[in-house]
Amino acid sequence: MGSVGKQPDWRTEPREDQSPRILGNPDKNFWIWSKENGYDLTHPPKPDSEPIEPRLRLQCSLTPVIIDPAKTALLIIDLQNYDLHKALGNNNQNFYHAEKTILESAIPAARKAGIQIIYLTTGYSDDDLLEMDPAVFRTFDFNPDEEDPNWENLRPGEGFSDKGEYRNKKGIGEEIGEVELNKHTKVNAGRVLIRGSWNSQLHDPLAKSYEASQATQKPDVHFYKNRSSGMCTRMTDLTEYLEEHKLKTLLFTGINIDQCVMGTLQDAYLKGYDTIMLKDGCATDSPAYANKSVEFNCLRCWGFLSTCKNFSEAVSEL
């Protein structure tokens, strides 16, 4: 998988035979690899079937991949008011950059190629709160005491005090109250991350894109999740939709790259989907090392690593 330090030759030296190879079960789920063309993820009926057309050649960090737009979906994860709207005090420029890149590159490319766009956001029901594991409450309801204002640039675990954690002013399910959108408009922000509340809704620019799509031949779809992963065992709506529509290749964008994006991508990978992270359409408020770890593992272990820019360029060549 790629690691630091000297590895045995039998793990790292290239073999003499570099001819094309079928990866997986040719009767179920397989890729076709060749040294010249990289990985063919188009999933034809059989390895010797006629090539799937149209096909999209997407350059990834180590290798190109070939995908079938009809079997592909663009996932946009957790870009909602809770984390992005400035009326709630948010001002993470990395989040806004990822959103802008998705809006300007990934979404137009997906629409042009006929690729399904899927929004996946966090939203809890009152029943969810009754069944919620304590670890989920801790994630949203508590924060660590920080000893060093530059903790995000330090090594993992460093920069925190020994004072433990403190409970946030507002936790999951609690009322935020009224917030001011501008000088003339106020809105009830609703209960923290409760489905249907204003704070749980898609951030305005993406909400407008979603609404505009509803009049098209392939409208965007939206699913809520109540865990960090939208494809874990407890969350079946998205997986059932993908299976029903025969969508096999998933392009991942959203926030946080090391939490909900990574969690969903890993579960998709374990379920046998093709997973491709578009890194410039992702962001996090975690330290830089968290982002780097996810990108490295997508590069080699969990699928492929590319960009919205590469995706847009690939579609322009269809």
Image (cartoon, rainbow, N blue to C red):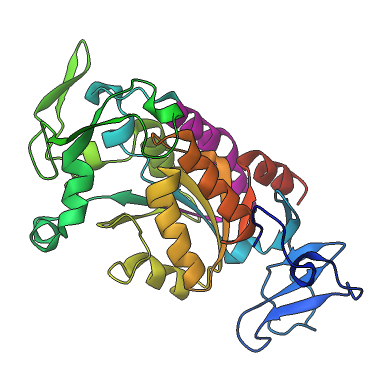
Work out whether residue 280 or residue 108 is closer to the camera in this orientation and state it: 280
Q: Is residue 51 left or right of residue 267?
A: right
**Residue 17 locus on image (x, y percent):** 90, 76
Residue at 64%, 58% in the rendered image = 300
The part of the chain drawn in magenta is 94-119
**Magenta span contains residue 106:** yes
Question: Which quadrant, please, contains the N terminus?
Answer: bottom right
In which quarter of the view is residue 140 placed? top left
Q: Is residue 318 left or right of residue 279?
A: right
Work out whether residue 136 or residue 123 is closer to the camera in this orientation and state it: 136
**Magenta span contains residue 261:** no
Q: Is residue 167 left or right of residue 89?
A: left
Residue at 48%, 71% in the rendered image = 270
Residue at 35%, 22% in the rendered image = 91
**Residue 113 locus on image (x, y percent):** 64, 52
Q: Image height check: is 190 above or below 265? A: above
In which quarter of the view is residue 87 placed? top left
Residue at 38%, 27% in the rendered image = 151
